[in-house]
Image (spheres, rainbow, N blue to C red):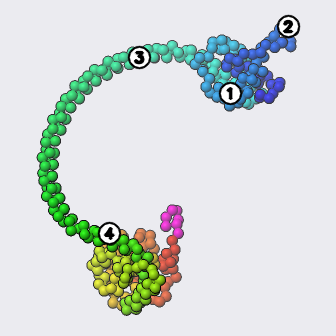
Amino acid sequence: VKSLKKPPAGVKLTMEAACIMFGVKPNMVADPDNMGKKIKDYWEPAQKNLLADANKLLQRLFNFDKDNIPEKNIQLIQPYINSPAFQPTEIEKASKACTAICMWSRAMNTYHFVAKQVEPKRKKLAEAEAELEITMGKLQKARDELQGVMDKITELENGLNTALAKKEDLANQVEQCSARLGRAKKLIGGLGGEKDRWTQSVAQFAIDYVNLLGDVLISSASIAYLGPYTSDFRAKLVAKWHKCIEDLHIPHTPKCDLVNTLGDPVTIRSWQVSGLPTDQLSTENAIVIEKARRWPLLIDPQTQANKFIKNLGKEHGKNGIEVTKPSNKNFLRTLENGVRFGKWILLENVSEKLDAALEPILQQQVFKQQGQD
């Protein structure tokens, strides 16, 4: 619109109305139809003051003080408002950009007259609200005075209750302090001997930290390689590994083994309660079962491991344990339920060849579907 040298009549009319609303003064130019007379020309002032910056114009439209439009501007714009040519439908034929300005000008004019009618009612409403505020203030003052009296009564009652409670609390504290003092004397006497044990434990932890590499190396090798072998052969291999790490100067605890490094006495004791034999070989096998990443295959002619696994599953399995065999017709369904619901599965009487359907489970081939493993 700004770049138009000879704007259409609709555009020119719209910008004249906008200039009147914003109070932009026109240029007085010679009237081409009447020699010696001058007419108002709003186009050049509109280009300089309104159309120079589209963003600024939009901001001025938004921030226009519609409640304080000068009466002079309203009188000047009335001929435009009453003109059939100054209708949005007519202006749209000349310029879509000016249609909104036309609608805005007409809306500001309508708002001015509506506001003049509403203003007396607003004043009456303000007077009524002020009178109501005074009345409510008096009412609130009376309520505050009443509340002050009630608060004072409540404060006195609370003070009495607090004093009685404090008296009872002090009596309880005296009794508790006497009991705590007696227990503290016993505790101090009992902890006196713990200092030496703690000092020894700290010193041992420092040694274990240095020897951690060799101890874990022996334990990892035991889990990875010693599973199928007998107790005597395991001892020979471990002794050979000890000699190797000594030759390589790898720090380790003398005579370290799987039980001493990874075994927890409390856990081992709970296993034995569940039916684990107390010999060294069985304890090592139980640790391998617990620490290894793969599912264990147990060669169990005396069914000792079978009983131990069943008891352990009943006591420590979150959802229990299911026992099945490859010959059972529903053993795949049992495996599926175990995977789905987190049950322990004990597969008995396996042969040298396993069903191919077990491969994803044995290989622990886990994938995510809909955010779940």
Say if residue 314 shows up in the picture. Answer: no
Q: Which residue is mark 3?
A: 130
Mark whose residue sits in front, 4 or 2: 4
Tell me the CA gap for discs 1 and 4.
Answer: 78 Å
For the stretch drawn in magenta, the main secondary structure is loop
Question: Label 1: how many residues lie within 10 Å, few (<14), some (14-19) or many (20+)?
Answer: some
Position of residue 314 relative to residue 79, above or below, is below
Q: SS class of the residue under badge 4?
A: helix
Residue at the spot of label 4 = 202
Q: Earlier in the sequence, mark 1 or mark 4?
A: 1
Which of pointers 4 and 2 lies earlier in the amino acid sequence? 2
- Judged left or right of residue 60, residue 159 is left
Q: Is residue 135 magenta?
A: no
Q: CA distance from mark 1 to mark 2?
A: 35 Å
Q: Which is closer to the viewer, label 2 or label 3?
A: 2
**Disc marking residue 166:** none
Mark 2 lies on a secondary structure that is loop
User: Is 174 left, or right, of 106 in this rendering?
Assistant: left
Q: CA distance from mark 4 to mark 2?
A: 113 Å
Image-quadrant location for residue 54: top right
Q: Is residue 36 above or below residue 5?
A: above
Q: Which residue is label 2 attached to? A: 36
Graded by Cα atoms within 10 Å as few (under 14), some (14 to 19) or many (20 or more), the crowding at tag 2 reads: few
Q: At 48% from the left edge and 79% from the top edge, which residue is drawn?
A: 362
Camera-nearest residue between 169 and 313: 169
The residue singled out by tag 1 in the image is 57
Q: Secondary structure at mark 3?
A: helix
Q: What is the crowding at mark 4: few (fewer than 14 residues within 10 Å), some, or many (at least 20)?
A: few
Distance of mark 1 from mark 3, alpha carbons?
39 Å
Q: Which residue sits furthest top?
A: 36
